[in-house]
Amino acid sequence: MASTERLYYDDSYLREFEAQVLDVEPRPPHFRVYLDRTAFYPESGGQPMDRGTLGGLPVIQVTEEGDAVVHVVERELPREQVKGVIDWPRRFDHMQQHTGQHVLSAAFEKVAEVRTVGFHLGAEISTIDLDSDRLGHRQMEQAVELANQVVFEDRPAHIIYCAAAEANQMELRRPTQRAGEVRVVEVEGFDRSACGGTHLRRTGGVGLILLRKIERRKDLTRVEFVCGGRALKCARQDYEVLTKAAGLFSTSAENVPPLISQQAEELRLALRLREKLLERLCEYRARELWAAAPERNGVKIVRLVFPAEENLEAKLFAHAVAKHPSAVGLIGLKGKPGALFFSQWVGGPFNMGAIMKQTVAQVGGKGGGAQDFAQGGGLDEGKLEEALTFAEGLI
């Protein structure tokens, strides 16, 4: 198949075009259309494909096949002149993100001497992977400040065509491995990169670059970012969330983080106190039931089923029972699914892990444990009493 002239190389702002249909190949349930030229960008280099219409038909997919660009549509097109229309909001969004990525990657290289080794333009968030996991917070701030300064300066972005050898002498941010003619995207006075993607004519169109998340990975740092319209949307969402949080706390927005931190610490302390009180309550209750339990073959079995909302209490109670001499705790917990906790006094003769495995094998679920304590789950709560009776029979 003949190569396709790629109109977006020279004019990323082209929204409509006319082209000759060279071939249509049926690939049920769709058709693959080959044109002599196209403004549709195919999925490549971390940038998603364009969408739009071809001859009035929605373009489902755009891919590369050697030097040809393949357009996938729902119905067969006649082999004649056809009009293509680009989904402009999607195209412009991709131009903002991709141009912003070039600027941001160059800023990280200038500020922290780290290279971008991966780029992905997602539906909502874009990412770059940097070849270091040791970037500091201040370096991040400096890189973003520099990148946005270049955006605000509204620098021109040029497209340059040259031989690969010549391109590699132009101080490219990353040397190209391509042969023949190379397309270079230059942000004037700041960055040169070999790239086949769609880009803005000036950096001002990026609008704003915001970092959203920093993730350390093996020898890499993944940076999530948004540009332009996406940055505006995120800023609005952040403002709405912060405003609502401030309203809930009856304070100003800047006081929300310290108040959340304070309340989180208070909640942590309250939960710790609650657990201590529950533990003490369980010990009192376990002592009473252990004292009242009949002794059989020198063993006192305490058997009890807790409601579903008392998960923590059930486990604490099982441990509390085991603090008493010659005591075995067979504890059930209602819920969907139900759970079991088996315990015995330290040094007791039974293997509670083995008893648990036999029990869940009998009534369903799964579980296991150690000599003195075991737990199981995934049970039908209607079989809890059957499970406790079965386990008691093994004691």
Image (cartoon, helix red, strand yellow):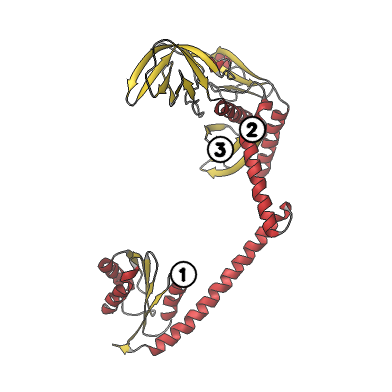
Mark 1, mark 3: which one is toward the viewer? 1
Cα distance between the residues tagged 1 and 3: 39 Å
Q: Is residue 192 visible?
A: yes
Q: Against 283, is 380 above or below?
A: above
Residue 125's disc number: 3
Q: How many marks?
A: 3
* Residue 282, horizontal then vertical, whole percent: 48, 79
Residue drawn at 72 percent across, 31 percent down: 149
Residue drawn at 67 percent across, 22 percent down: 202
- The quadrant the C terminus occupies is bottom left
Identify the secondary structure beneath mark 1.
loop
Dot 1 or dot 3, earlier in sequence: 3
Residue 177's disc number: none
Comparing 23 with 221, the one in front is 23
* Residue 357, horizontal then vertical, whole percent: 29, 68
Residue receiving disc 2: 228
Q: Against 219, is 175 above or below?
A: above
Question: Is disc 3 surrounded by few (<14), some (14 to 19) or many (20+) residues within 10 Å?
Answer: some
Cα distance between the residues tagged 2 and 1: 47 Å
Residue drawn at 44 percent across, 14 percent down: 35
Identify the secondary structure beneath mark 3.
loop
Cα distance between the residues tagged 2 and 3: 12 Å
Dot 2 or dot 1, earlier in sequence: 2
Residue receiving disc 1: 309
- 298 with respect to 224 (left or right): left
Comparing 341 with 192, the one in front is 341
Dot 2 or dot 3, earlier in sequence: 3
